[in-house]
Amino acid sequence: MQLRIFTAERDNQRAEITFMRLAVGGLALALLANAAALLSVAGSERTVLIPPEVHRTFWVSGRKVSADYLQEMAYWYAGLALNITPQVADYQKHLFLKYAAPAEYGRLQAEFGARSDFIRKNNASTQFSAQAVLPNEATMQVALSGVLMTWVGDKKAAEKQATWLVGFRYLNGRLHVSEFRETSDQDPFGAGAAAR
């Protein structure tokens, strides 16, 4: 009798040990499969972003931003900076600077402050009509070419063909403006000026 009980207990313990080994092995395989899946997905996540006015979908991935998103945002920032009147100069300057790259904030603030002061002192207005938008996804820059018209009071003071460069940095999940300057049609990305 004792031998049969002992044998039954031993068989139960062996069965439990076998079951535990199989369970631990299954969990280890599931953990390895989960780790492999995470490694294959790491760094390839895309976030769909929505600009102020939606014309098409955009994405960001790691430190890259789609060219379509760069184009839309450059057009929007150029509108803030160049479609300006004395009444909205300060508001648009503050709105633009909300998106300035932290390292470039002081320089952009000084440039926009001088432009706003000029607009207010001369009762001037400017309007930029973009005719071409050329993105450079690798450098996160966009060149906008078009016509810049200037009015002083109610008189048209100037109309010229102009090209503006908008540079971006993607930091902490947000697209920041790092540069905004006038270039030329011959050198829209200002490579000649940067080389000097």
Image: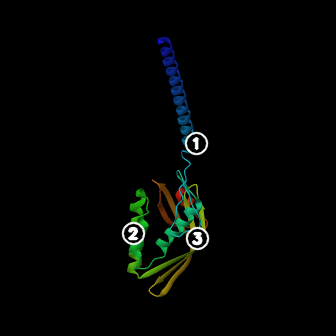
Lower position in the chain sequence, tag 2 or tag 3:
2
Instruction: Name the residue at 43% across, 62% down.
Output: 100
Colouring mode (rainbow / by chain / secondary structure / one colour): rainbow
Residue of label 1: 40
Gap between marks 2 and 3, in whole Å? 24 Å
Q: How many marks?
A: 3
Relative to residue 143, is residue 30 depicted above or below?
above
Residue of label 2: 94
- Whole-percent x and y of residue 115? 42, 72
86 to the left or right of 23? left
Instruction: Name the residue at 50% across, 24% down.
Output: 16
Q: Secondary structure at mark 1?
A: helix
Instruction: Name the residue at 41% across, 64% down.
Output: 98
Relative to residue 104, is residue 185 depicted above or below?
below
Q: Nearer the viewer, residue 1 or 42?
A: 1
128 to the left or right of 87? right
